[in-house]
Amino acid sequence: MKFKEIGEFGFIESIKKECITTLKDIIKGIGDDCAVFGPYSGRVLLFTTDMLVEDIHFLKAKITPYQLGWKTIAVNLSDIAAMGGRPLFLLISLAIPAEMNVELIQDFYKGMKDICEHYEVNILGGDTVASPDKLVISVSLIGDAKENEVLYRSGARPGDRIYVTGNVGDSSAGLKILKNEISPPKSIASHFIKIHNEPKPLIKTGRIIAASRLASAMIDLSDGLLSDLGHICKESGVGAILFRSKIPLSSELKLLASRVKLNPIDLAFSGGEDYLLLLTVPEAKIKDFEILYKDKGSSPLYLIGEIREKKGVRMVNDDGSIEEISIRGFNHFSPSFLDP
Amino acid sequence: MKFKEIGEFGFIESIKKECITTLKDIIKGIGDDCAVFGPYSGRVLLFTTDMLVEDIHFLKAKITPYQLGWKTIAVNLSDIAAMGGRPLFLLISLAIPAEMNVELIQDFYKGMKDICEHYEVNILGGDTVASPDKLVISVSLIGDAKENEVLYRSGARPGDRIYVTGNVGDSSAGLKILKNEISPPKSIASHFIKIHNEPKPLIKTGRIIAASRLASAMIDLSDGLLSDLGHICKESGVGAILFRSKIPLSSELKLLASRVKLNPIDLAFSGGEDYLLLLTVPEAKIKDFEILYKDKGSSPLYLIGEIREKKGVRMVNDDGSIEEISIRGFNHFSPSFLDP
């Protein structure tokens, strides 16, 4: 069987077994935004990694080296945000084509260093190797959190409300513009490209949510709203409904949809790379949570659905009709992704 | 400037600045086999990463997928061994060509899982992405050690003796055979190929040395004896002499050198990938160290030189003459490496 046939998630299922040889100190292995181990003096450590490959995750012509450095770290920080943690230390590995300009890589490092300084993260080292042709970047990041504040994908229960911390779909529209699939006027395009190329990981928001101890599950939106909600449902053993009319869309996305052929709900559901937080809160706690979040939260908050016992994700349309929706999203081995 | 002109070590120098934004909990950043942070309840954490790229670090035709999995983890474990630590948790990132056979990657995972089980290391997750053509592997590993037992590159002082824990150069001979640069009979070749493809990281040996608290500095031999000794000298601000007649060579390497055109000392000095430990011990402690090591050590031990105040590495020849030797070794951007 070829890799593109089994896909990313099928492959992970196939190799999941026998990864843990001793259970000592392991709180969470495969299956969440970060691995979790410890505790050490009441705090647990969070451990995550992401790999970015030229021509798969980025096109050199479509992002500046500085932005690429920023985004590389941002996607890792977002995994720490999704657990409610604080990012601490990272290692950067690069496979660099021999003919690549040093200045380009130094600009790339400038972007990484600036976001690290902003979020008080330290670069502790890495590995620098040659690559036959493509630039490949791998970052591994350690963070920490109070043991009793960490939020997993697995904590959602029927009746919990589903929230998202911002407008969904703008990043995906940015990617479509960069890939020339849609061509809006430049004045409209720049908003989406900036959101796609310069994501802002919601570390502070994640920590406020975790410290409230009112939420039951959390994930960051990297694969797409439906796919990431699907991860929560799978790990929690539940299903969900989403209210179509409550999915938050930016005024920019609505304007764009009026100019080019585009279904904004499709982008919101399947687009990916929003790097917002998707979380669930038990019904009995939503009032306290909304008051506390409004007081302390730096991001907006939208109630978009509910967790249900029945598996699968269903959408409640504006007329009250309910439709089953399949979980589409970012799959690194889907043919459409490899042939952009 | 092109990347191949600045080279790996030149590049690292150029980006070293401004990597640390807060000093909190950081014991060692860039410049050793692992980053070190903590302590947490008297233990520090060790953090290391390695990237392996198809056609640069390995040729699919020259190593089995199982061996590649084993070796991928072994080279990371060796970095933990070099600090005297205990390996604990790792993340594996893979960029996989869509056309690659799943079975191949599963064999690769089998090799990784077997070495992890052997060394009681847990695989906690990772990232799986598509690659346009080459397989790229990145592993990041966390270990720990008692705070007062960790061995750094920077502890060597003039007068310290230099030891190595096994025969040097066999792995490099194996690489030459795999690259068809030399063609000994198959009965001779297999020893070297096995050593090159299935390194055994010296975790137990490293921990014995660290727990003795008699050594002053340690590193693993990955870049080559001269290059790695050079790292110790640089970080410690010292120089060294090596006794040519004391460099340990296997009987197999001596036999090989008698059959094909080969200088075994060249391989020993510049070959790389031995994954042995190179360490220094203060003169006043060598007697105690040798007794303790003989009692507990599972690897051999060879005294090969001395640390000197004068910078640079010099070789004492069999006739007592001394020659300055330049530090050659594994540089990922040297033209000879890219054009094997």
Image (cartoon, coloured by chain):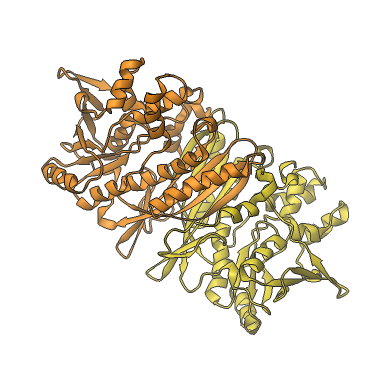
Chain colours: A yellow, B orange
User: Observer-nearest residue: B33 or B76?
Assistant: B76
In the picture, measured across the screen, residue A74 lies left or right of residue B258, that is right
Q: Is residue A190 visible?
A: no
Q: Is residue A74 visible?
A: yes
Residue at position x 46%, y 26% in the image: B178
Where, by quadrant of the figure, is residue B10 drawn?
A: top left
- Among all residues in the image, which is located at the extreme bottom? A284
Count of numbered marks:
0
Q: Relative to B90, is B260 above or below? A: above
In the picture, measured across the screen, residue B116 lies left or right of residue A253, that is left
User: Observer-nearest residue: B234 or A94?
Assistant: A94
User: Observer-nearest residue: A254 or B144?
Assistant: B144
In the picture, measured across the screen, residue A153 lies left or right of residue B243, that is right
In the picture, measured across the screen, residue B287 lies left or right of residue B108, that is left
Rendered-image quadrant of the N terminus of chain A: top right
Where, by quadrant of the figure, is residue A153 drawn?
A: bottom right
| Residue B33 on image: x %, y % | 36, 44
Rendered-image quadrant of the C terminus of chain A: top right
| Residue A177 on image: x %, y % | 77, 46
| Residue B238 on image: x %, y % | 24, 35
Q: Relative to A109, is A244 above or below? A: below
Residue at position x 51%, y 49% in the image: B92
| Residue B246 on image: x %, y % | 20, 28
